[in-house]
Image (cartoon, helix red, strand yellow):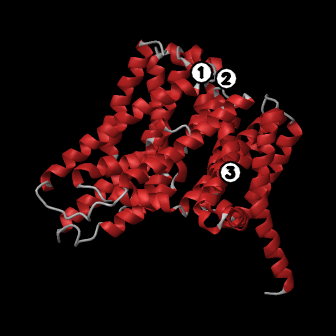
Amino acid sequence: MDENDSVSLGTILKLKSLSLPCCIFFTSTYLLVGMPSLAVISHICLVVYVLVEWPHLTRLPRLLLVACLVAILLLPFSSISSLSVLFVAMNSATWFATFLGAISFLREAATQSPLVFRCGEVIMNQSPSKRYATLSAGAFMIGTLLNLGVIHLLGGMVRQANTIEAAAGSESVQALRNRRMFSAMTRGFASTSLGSPLTMTLALILLLVPRVEWQVVVPLGMVAMILMHLVGWLLDRQSAQPLSGVQITLKPSLPGAGLALMKFIGLVFSIFIAAISVETLLSISLPLAIVLVSPLSAFVWIIVQNHREGFTDAILSSAGRIWHGAGKQFGNIRTEIVVLGASGLLGTVLAKLLPTTAFAELLESIGLKGAPVALLVMVLMSILPQFGFNPVLVATLILSSMEQPELFGLSPTLLALAVMAGWSLAISSSPVATTVIVAGRMAGVSPKELGWGWNGKFALVAGALLSCWLILLSKLSI
């Protein structure tokens, strides 16, 4: 490699390390002070990030970017104000990049945390009767911070633990355990869209329907999450009956297991409390507060991991780890950022072309108003992703077209819950969902087998139960 090549490589690495943090900074500052020029700078930073990452992108994100470019080029031929729509659409894209980028700091801290790995060991070392509940709950809990990384963490542990020796020499038991554990993980992780306030799902809803109150939606979403976990547990018990007589030897109980889990729960709770405090203090939205809190929380968490080095050295080594790892950290989430950002941009542009009142009148003309509309939203959110439509794109189209939910006989809360429920069902069962693709690869089965074969019945039963939950809330005028 000659000197010019070295300079070019160094420039690319610097752009990769700095473009996304700059996008996060300028987007956050714009949302705090409201200067449009800051938003434009954040748009430029995101474009630079995408250009730098383009050679490393796979087919799907590239196709989405091409679709965005086509939509933008067609804007001048529409009757709407193309520049204002483009500004709003780019704001949507940079917001997704900002939220995911900020949360990635927590993921980076979690990937090397002994506490996270310890919790994974505790979750894995359970009897068959408890394993589904602990795996699904653990996937939800750890997935709150690790996001998709929880599938890699727990999935790797499953593959190490689920040996033919551990299954008492029975291949059928080994296969059943594989199915039960990976089903539990994907279902548990999918439930974060309902029960976690730190997800993109809630951030998108609060962005597009600001009148939604997270203090109301999150507790109701947690109830729905519990219903999903209950359905999954019952179906798991049913699938386990044919081989219930086989005895599996467990490792001895891990000392301090309960304390490790309590520490992790306390960690997640403390980050959430910090976000609520910033939200109250600055009078900003909860997602923006999460963006502001996450990098600092991650920094403190890494310092604690390095506490044996002494306070000053721990600070310096932690800062060095974040600085030197930024390029890899932001490169690892390129697909998520491009797919979600492009979906948000494309959904915003398409939604602006749809007349909201006409959509409401169309639904009312066929007799859909109130709870039936909420059920339709949940069905669309769960069905369309089965055919390759990203949940962000579907949710953006729906929420942008229904930003006045009262026109459809819905409360903002019911609309939000319908989107959250459908989103959870989609990412647990869609063969093209990243969750299912990654889990299927680790489980040694096709995405269709895992999504439709293993989780299809779960999605149908859970969907029916969640429909009843939405109807009940509608009856209660929530």
Tell me, for residue 355, which label it has, or none.
2
Give the answer, above or below, for where 33 lies relative to 475.
below
Instruction: Kindly identify the residue that appears in the image at 52 percent across and 27 percent down.
Output: 217
Give the answer, above or below, for where 179 lies relative to 1.
above
Cα–Cα gap, marks 1 and 3:
41 Å
Q: Nearer the viewer, residue 314 or 133?
A: 314
Tell me the mark number nearer the camera, choosing from 2 and 3. 3
> Crowding near pointer 3: few (<14 within 10 Å), some, many (20+)?
many
Cα–Cα gap, marks 2 and 1:
6 Å
Give the SS element for disc 3. helix
Mark 3, residue position: 295
Residue 42 spot, x, y in % from top left:
81, 47
> Crowding near pointer 1: few (<14 within 10 Å), some, many (20+)?
some
Residue 335 at least partly seen: yes
Q: Which quarter shows the N terminus?
A: bottom right
Q: Amino acid at mark 3?
A: Pro
Residue 357 spot, x, y in % from top left:
64, 17
The quadrant where residue 128 appears: bottom left
Instruction: Kindly identify the residue that appears in the image at 48 percent across and 58 percent down.
Output: 115
Q: Amino acid at mark 1?
A: Phe
Q: Amino acid at mark 2?
A: Pro
Residue 429 spot, x, y in % from top left:
40, 46
Instruction: Kindly identify the residue that appears in the image at 81 percent across and 41 percent down.
Output: 29
Mark 1, residue position: 359
In this rendering, would 12 be left or right of 296? right
Image marks 2 and 1: residues in contact by CB distance under 8 Å: yes
> Crowding near pointer 2: few (<14 within 10 Å), some, many (20+)?
few
Residue 9 spot, x, y in % from top left:
78, 75
Which callout, 2 or 3, points at the residue further toward the start of the chain? 3
The quadrant where residue 82 appears: top right
